[in-house]
Amino acid sequence: MNVLWAPWREKYIEQCGMKKKRCIFCHIHKDKNDARHYIFLRSPRSFAVLNINPFSGGHALIIPNRHVDGLVALSVEERSDMMELLVETKKLLAKALNPEAFNVGMNL
């Protein structure tokens, strides 16, 4: 495959350039309106949110509470917390969707 094309995402992509330059993850973390932002789990140092423009069903993100510029900037406790939240997220998705498999990736 040379090109990944998801036509249902076109409207979202077009709107990205028109939005204010702010961190959407910081915004939804501070807003505390979990249902509105599809946040389904919170832990002391991170939160889990469903992707509103997923490539596939069950696409979730594990996001640190603290805004940092990379994995190395996170403390050991924050990284550990994110991994534990990933485990809990996987359990919930397995129960809700009963998938044959899971893909886990990182965007750094």
Image (cartoon, rainbow, N blue to C red):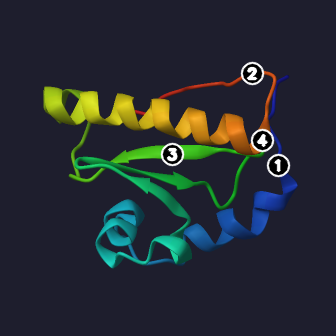
16 relative to 41, above or below: below
Rendered view: 106 above or below 31: above
- Name the outermost residue toward the front: 95
Image side of residue 104 versus residue 76, left or right: right
Residue placed under numbered mark 3 in the picture: 61
In this view, the mark in front (2 or 1): 2
Q: Is mark 1 on a helix, strand or loop?
A: loop
* Residue hosting label 1: 6
Q: Earlier in the sequence, mark 3 or mark 1?
A: 1
Mark 3–mark 4 distance (CA, rounded to whole Å) = 16 Å
Q: Mark 4 points at which residue?
A: 97
Point out the frontmost of discs 4 and 2. Answer: 4
Give whichever of 42, 103 is nearer the camera: 42
Q: How many residues crowd around disc 3 within 10 Å: few (fewer than 14), some, or many (20 or more)?
A: some
Instruction: Kindly report which numbered mark, 3 or 4, lies closer to the viewer in this rendering.
Output: 4
At which x and y percent is residue 76?
15, 26
Earlier-in-chain disc, 4 versus 1:
1
Which residue is pictured at 41% across the width and 66% down the height? Answer: 24
**Position of residue 69 in the picture relative to residue 38 (left or right):** left
Q: Quadrant of residue 32?
A: bottom left
Q: Is mark 3 on a helix, strand or loop?
A: strand
What's the residue type where badge 1 is placed?
Ala
Expressed as whole percent of the image width and height from the top left, the position of residue 77 reads 16, 31
Between disc 3 and disc 1, the foreground one is 3
Type of the residue with mark 4? Leu
Residue beneath the point at 34% across and 35% down: 82
Eye-nearest disc, 4 or 1: 4
Q: What element carries label 4?
A: helix
Q: Residue 101 carries which label?
A: 2
- Mark 1 burial class by Cα count in 10 Å: few <14, some 14-19, many 20+: few
Question: Can you say whether 47 is above or below 99 in the image?
Answer: below
Q: Distance between the residues labelled 3 and 1?
A: 19 Å
